[in-house]
Amino acid sequence: MNSDFSNITVVTVTGEAGPHAAAAAAPSLLHSAAQLPGSRALMISPERPRRLPGYVEHRRVKPFGYIGYSVFMVYCLESFIETDFALIVQKDGWVLDGKNWRDEFFQYDYIGAPSVTGLTVDSAGLRTLHNQYTWQSYVGATDVQLLPVYNGGLSFRSRKLLTAPRRLGLMMNISPPDIFLYDRDGSPLIDMDWPWGNHTEDTQLCAYMREPLEADGVRFAPLDLALDFSFEYIGDVIHADYDFARAFGTHCKFRTFLGGHPPIIDCRGNRDDIEGVYRQAEINEFLRSKYGYNITI
């Protein structure tokens, strides 16, 4: 590998309070940075984990929830990235194989795995947000513009992308949430949910802010390159005959990278949950056979 990674900061951001929350993201950060020799490593969290190596820079942040996380990633992360590019990782998003790095990634300002969400814009300008990979039916269509949302949990972003929303004065577009009650320890608890996921920072950047960002010269990777970069959930159209071994990284809420030798992957949820989602059991078997991961369910 002859690529120069010195202009990349591998960064993880969490607003969860307590040392355990930040510590949970450390293995994917350390592993991913090691896959890109010469890159910087940065953790932004309310507390620095006790065993975080000294070479990892830490910036302390006030605790925040997911909406705060989205706002931070869209408008604030740029203030803490000194390199030309940032690779965002999370406890459930990490680099699988640095050998799959392609210098072509440097030509784009935002790359992530194609997610279940996508936006279409028809000839009349009607914008429709699609979920559950229903946007796949528009791949190759000539009468609509298709804008897949690229997952942010493992994503590659340039400083141009990081600085653009604040510099251009772009506003986030978040719909009202569903409100529901559930019992917690015998008492009712109010919670909010955005079933269409439009509160996420990747949907904001890739869908709602896409037009002004591209007008400013921001380049989103084409779909075929995004498929080489990473995989998350699997679509029956875009991932038909997909070779997982080509992927640079992965992100999925079903799997948490715990580190170790060999690495341990903790699959959240039970076996039935995972096997009920398209090709997720196949992915687990791939991770075992290709990388020797020890997967616990």
Image (cartoon, rainbow, N blue to C red):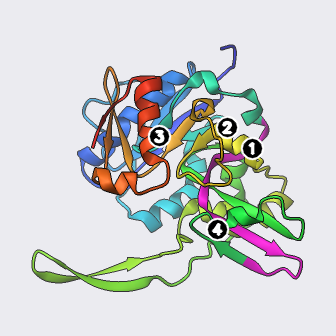
Q: Earlier in the sequence, mark 1 or mark 4?
A: 4
Q: Main secondary structure of the magenta part?
A: strand
Q: Which residue is labeled 1 in the image?
A: 224
Looking at this rendering, what residue extends furthest in the top direction? 2
Where residue 297 appears, x then y in whole percent?
Answer: 27, 44
Q: Nearer the viewer, mark 3 or mark 1?
A: 3
Mark 2 and mark 1 in contact (Cβ < 8 Å)? yes
Magenta residue span: 107-127
The image quadrant of residue 50 is top left
Q: Residue 207: where, in percent of width, then height?
A: 69, 66
Tell me the number on the disc at residue 283.
3
Residue at position x 42%, y 34% in the image: 285
Among numbered discs 3 and 4, the one appearing first in the sequence: 4
Give the amino acid at mark 2: Asp
- Rendered image quadrant of residue 65: bottom left
Which circle marks residue 228 in the picture?
Answer: 2
Marks 2 and 4: in contact by CB < 8 Å? no
- Residue 134 - label: 4
Quadrant housing residue 206 = bottom right
Q: Position of residue 41 (x, y in %)?
A: 49, 31
